[in-house]
């Protein structure tokens, strides 16, 4: 946390930036020393240095002073402190004399807009002269063409701040938008907005086309959907786009590859689509299907398309704020596109949109019929699974409406749910007789009066006897769930609190296995050796004895586990008991998967909890309860004993009298039913049945069974 830097040291730094104290002791600070001092600055002190850091361009300063200026600009860009009117005016004047922007690249109007948006103090009339100076420095002239819509909006915002002196800017911009009719309509609309709204809109516009593929807008920006007038414009803009594309595909307008829309108009359509997706506007659902697929395919057999920029812009909007219908439109566009490069981009955006749909759980059950294919159903199952951490409740009537689609009914009715009454009391139940009735783990139909909300059941929310009852019921009915739910590992102790993480400390791990699996499961490492996995606003960290750098081999040791919660743009540590029970269980499940797979076992070496191994044993006990040789089987924590033979539940390796056996291949036999996908579980089941037959005749001498695979 930042604390105030002593006044003399702050004045010395200001003098160094002004070039009046080249011999300052701060001139000897480099790298980490500079970063450490800047971290101690509070927001007010950092803001006071911003005008001087901006004014270093062109001054005869030492290399040390320029390094300080760059570090201050970097810190300012990261922390974004609020600015007083006086500091904002000084920063605008210094900016208007620079040849580059606040960090790098050519100076752009949005650099000034970003400063103005951070000034929330009254007295904006004192900013008119600095805003006009920056406006003139940006080189606006009458009749200039506007190729980037974000620049046009930023210039308009600067002109509004400049007051009467900038009154002619809107007319100049409109004259330059003759080739961009959608941008011209947007400028006419936002020109009458309050200044702060216009500044925020210009900053949002700057996100395109540089916005990352799946990153949302910064949290401090007001959603576009909060403006009713902008939503009306968004519908108008997309209707205009649909009509233009219809004219091209019907032959009423000539087709020229990649010329149906300008790049500036692509930005307008990105903002319009994003605004509609933010509030899930009903009118967007049919309209997007009229724009997205047609813009991705030529009306001829050519491998071109009417507008690459619009195709990518709409895909980015869907990725940032996905809805089921938008994903369906994107999937349809991908199936029709012929351009190889655009196809690859749509593949990437489609996969990201399907993942991010889980962050809008209230929309999950609205998967349209057109999207109810195998891939979309698998995506829906993954998105439902993600709600264990992200949360999600649905109206019972919406759930029943979704069940009217046969493909969705099969998925949703194969899961266990919890239904809530008006007092917030939950009961566990599974659909029976279609979607009209629910029964508990013992098959008794439950009363639904007053229960109009439901959520997914999770074993961490249930009692041990109920978990066992649900497993027995699924095995009895031979019900295979679309996602691992009833047979899911949970990580709570007998008191219902998160399991002790000390069991993950001091493990010896295989570097090669750990690096590959961690990457596939979404873990990320840093230079300190911390492995981190984020799930929504929650994150788990696992300390390693060394970073997983390229070329590292052999073994590595594990350290302590910590949890974090996201607060704005920062991660803050939290205790395990502060996490919701299901969230803690899911994060520890991900860690146990990593630890159990990568741990190197050995004499005296600690082992991870491996609850998935214990669950495998309990599942086998259920499956083999009626086996004729059940009395020969003894299930232990990590092994199952079959007569004289011993099978490891984690690897399915067999041993006899302490020596590992390489057993012959399992004989071909009909595939056994399993309650969930697990290759090791299937192999264990086959091995147990194979060894149970042999165990009936115990060997008189050690058997050589080292042949086969």
Image (cartoon, helix red, strand yellow):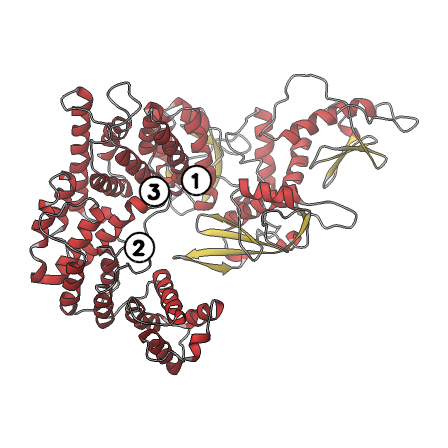
Residue beneath disc 2? 105
Residue beneath disc 1? 455
Q: Is residue 136 visible?
A: yes
* Quadrant into which the C terminus falls: top right
Q: Nearer the viewer, mark 2 or mark 3?
A: 2
At label 3, counting other C-alpha atoms closer than 10 Å, the crowd grade (few under 14, some 14-19, many 20 or more) is many
Q: Which of marks 1 and 3 precedes in the sequence?
A: 3
How far apart, in angstroms, are the residues tagged by discs 2 and 3? 27 Å
Residue beneath disc 3? 320
Circle 1 sits in a helix, a strand or a loop, which is it?
A: strand
Q: Is residue 624 visible?
A: no
In the image, what residue occupies the spot 37% across and 27% down? 340
How far apart, in angstroms, are the residues tagged by discs 2 and 1? 50 Å
From the top left corner, tell me how far across and down residue 513 is, in percent.
63, 41
In the image, what residue occupies the spot 39% across and 31% down? 344
From the top left corner, tell me how far across and down residue 530 is, in percent.
56, 54
Circle number at residue 28 = none
At label 1, counting other C-alpha atoms closer than 10 Å, the crowd grade (few under 14, some 14-19, many 20 or more) is many
Vertical arrangement, residue 312 with respect to residue 155, above or below = above
* Quadrant into which the N terminus falls: bottom left
- Quarter-wise, where is residue 464 in the image? top right
Q: Nearer the viewer, residue 707 or 553?
A: 553
């Amino acid at each position: 946390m930042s604390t105030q830097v002593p006044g003399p040291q702050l004045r010395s730094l200001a003098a160094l930036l002004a070039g009046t104290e080249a011999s300052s002791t701060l001139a000897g600070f480099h790298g980490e020393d500079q970063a450490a001092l800047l971290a101690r600055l509070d927001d007010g002190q950092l803001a006071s240095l911003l005008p001087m850091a901006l004014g270093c361009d062109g001054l005869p300063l030492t290399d040390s002073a320029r390094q300080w200026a760059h570090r201050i600009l970097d810190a300012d860009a990261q922390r974004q402190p609020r600015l007083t009117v006086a500091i904002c005016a000084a920063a605008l004047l210094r900016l208007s004399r620079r040849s580059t922007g606040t960090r790098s690249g050519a100076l752009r109007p949005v650099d000034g807009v970003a400063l103005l948006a951070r000034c929330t103090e009254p007295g904006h009339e004192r900013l008119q002269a600095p805003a006009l100076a920056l406006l003139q420095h940006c080189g606006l002239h009458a009749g200039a063409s506007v190729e980037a819509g974000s620049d046009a909006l930023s210039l308009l915002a600067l002109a509004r701040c400049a007051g009467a002196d900038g009154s002619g800017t809107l007319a100049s911009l409109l004259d330059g938008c003759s080739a961009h009719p959608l941008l011209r309509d947007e400028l006419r609309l936002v020109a009458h907005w309050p200044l702060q709204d216009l500044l925020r809109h210009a900053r949002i516009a700057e996100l395109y086309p540089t916005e990352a593929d799946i990153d949302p807008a910064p949290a401090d920006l007001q959603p576009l959907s909060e403006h009713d007038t902008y939503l009306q414009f968004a519908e108008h803009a997309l209707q205009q786009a649909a009509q233009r594309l219809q004219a091209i595909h019907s032959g009423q307008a000539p087709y020229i590859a990649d010329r149906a829309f300008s790049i500036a108009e692509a930005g307008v359509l990105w903002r319009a689509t994003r605004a509609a997706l933010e509030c899930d506007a009903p009118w967007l659902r049919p309209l997007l299907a009229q724009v997205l697929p047609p813009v991705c395919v030529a009306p001829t057999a050519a491998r071109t398309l009417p507008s690459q920029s619009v195709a990518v812009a709409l895909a980015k909007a869907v990725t940032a704020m996905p809805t089921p219908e938008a994903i369906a439109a994107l999937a349809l566009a991908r199936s029709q596109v012929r351009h190889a490069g655009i196809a690859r981009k749509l593949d990437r955006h489609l996969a990201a949109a399907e993942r991010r749909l889980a962050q809008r759980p209230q929309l999950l059950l609205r998967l349209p019929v057109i999207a109810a294919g195998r891939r979309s159903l698998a995506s829906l199952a993954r998105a439902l699974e993600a709600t264990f951490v992200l949360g999600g409740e649905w109206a019972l009537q919406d759930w029943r409406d979704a069940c009217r689609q046969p493909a969705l009914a099969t998925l949703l009715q194969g899961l266990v749910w919890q239904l809530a009454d008006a007092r917030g009391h939950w009961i566990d139940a599974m659909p029976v007789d279609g979607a009209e009735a629910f029964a508990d783990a013992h098959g008794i139909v439950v009363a639904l009066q007053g229960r109009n909300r439901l959520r997914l059941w999770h074993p961490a929310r249930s009692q041990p006897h109920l978990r066992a009852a649900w497993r027995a019921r699924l095995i009895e009915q031979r019900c295979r769930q679309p996602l691992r739910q009833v047979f899911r590992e949970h990580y709570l102790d007998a008191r219902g609190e998160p399991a002790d993480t000390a069991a993950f400390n001091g493990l010896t791990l295989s570097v090669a296995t750990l690096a590959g699996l961690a990457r596939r499961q979404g873990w990320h490492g840093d230079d300190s050796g911390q492995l981190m996995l984020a799930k929504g606003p929650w994150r788990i960290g696992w300390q390693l004895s060394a970073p997983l750098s390229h070329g590292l081999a052999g073994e590595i040791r594990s350290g302590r586990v910590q949890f974090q919660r996201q607060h704005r743009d920062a991660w803050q540590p939290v205790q395990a008991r502060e996490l919701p029970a299901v969230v803690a269980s899911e994060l520890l499940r991900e860690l146990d998967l990593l630890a159990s797979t990568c741990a190197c076992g050995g004499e005296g070496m600690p082992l991870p909890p491996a609850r998935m191994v214990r669950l495998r044993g309990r599942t086998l006990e259920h499956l083999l309860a009626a086996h004729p040789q059940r009395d020969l089987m003894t299930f232990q924590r990590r092994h199952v004993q079959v007569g004289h033979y011993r099978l490891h539940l984690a690897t399915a390796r067999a041993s006899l009298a302490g020596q590992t056996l390489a057993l012959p291949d399992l004989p071909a036999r009909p595939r056994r039913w399993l309650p969930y996908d697990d290759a090791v579980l299937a192999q264990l089941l086959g091995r147990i049945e194979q060894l149970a037959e042999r165990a009936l005749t115990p060997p008189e001498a050690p058997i050589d069974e080292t042949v086969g695979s």
